[in-house]
Image: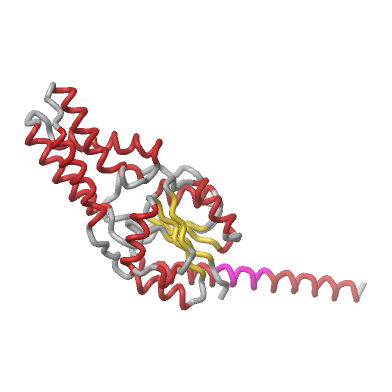
Amino acid sequence: MQKQTILFNLDDTLAYCNRYFNQVIEVFTEQIIKWFDTLTKEEIRQKQLEIDLEAIDEYGLISARFPESFVGTYKYFCDLTGKEKKKSDIDSLRELGCKVFKIPVEPIPYMNETLQQLKDAGHELYLHTGGDEANQRWKITQLELTTYFEHRIFISEHKDTTALTDILKTIDADPKITWMIGNSLRTDIMPALEKNINAIYIPAETEWDFNVVEIKMEPKRAFYTLHSLQEVPNAIHQHIIKKEKFRNNFASNYNSHHRNEEEDNLFT
């Protein structure tokens, strides 16, 4: 079986992430409502999301961006309502936002089994995750992911097509046998399709708005949507079999055609 080059995303592909952010955001909205009782949870969430997404354009996926979105939301509503900004409030919100990065990481079901199965099949596994070095390394250590990826780990603060391009060049990847597997349409799937490599999309249990985009391009290679990590090895295996069968049939038909031509030439 032909060895494949397989890149995995980390957050919400191999380990849960969004559920913890949502839990902390819920605590945040409850606190803001206590200070601004005329606001709704939806207004607070939308402003926090707006500030958080704006910061990504400038700072990328660094961890500090998230707690600062809490502070920015608080300051916005203070200015809007005329409430005095208090340092104690700002400090408590920043501390709350940082708590999400201290929650123990929980692997998504079948993470270890999937990675081990692909490794045992002889495929070369890479991790391409977005975020800052310290936080992502902390998760990688907790999950013992070097068991499968060893040194083949890439962490990008700006996880986009440019980052993927650099990685593919670094590892000298052959697009025909290279895969990107992830939950983010924006940072995993679109870059993969733009680089003409194979892609597997596994929707997260809850998705961050930043990751939701419309895929308009036509895939030039395999593009599957699966609903469990457990399905990944078989999907790749079946793809390889189909490709090998096609090549064998093509070679057989090609050789048969040329044999017939040679036989015809003998009798002319």
Answer with the quarter of the image where residue 40 lies: top left
Q: Visible in this render: residue 218?
A: no
Q: Position of residue 208 (x, y in %)?
A: 30, 46
Which residue is painted at 47% across and 46% down in the image? 160
Residue 247 lies in magenta, yes or no? yes
Considering depth in this image, is 66 or 234 the residue closer to the camera? 66
Majority secondary structure of magenta residues? helix
253 displayed left or right of 267: left
Does residue 131 lie above or below 125 as drawn? above
Looking at this rendering, what residue extends furthest in the bottom direction? 120
Q: Visible in this render: residue 17?
A: yes
Considering depth in this image, is 51 or 234 the residue closer to the camera? 51
Q: Identify the magenta region.
A: 242-250
Considering depth in this image, is 159 or 100 the residue closer to the camera? 100
Q: Position of residue 85 (x, y in %)?
A: 15, 28
Looking at this rendering, what residue extends furthest in the right direction? 268
Quadrant location of the C terminus?
bottom right
Answer with the quarter of the image where residue 200 lies: bottom left
Residue 125 lies in magenta, yes or no? no
Does residue 47 lie above or below 137 as drawn? above
220 displayed left or right of 17: right
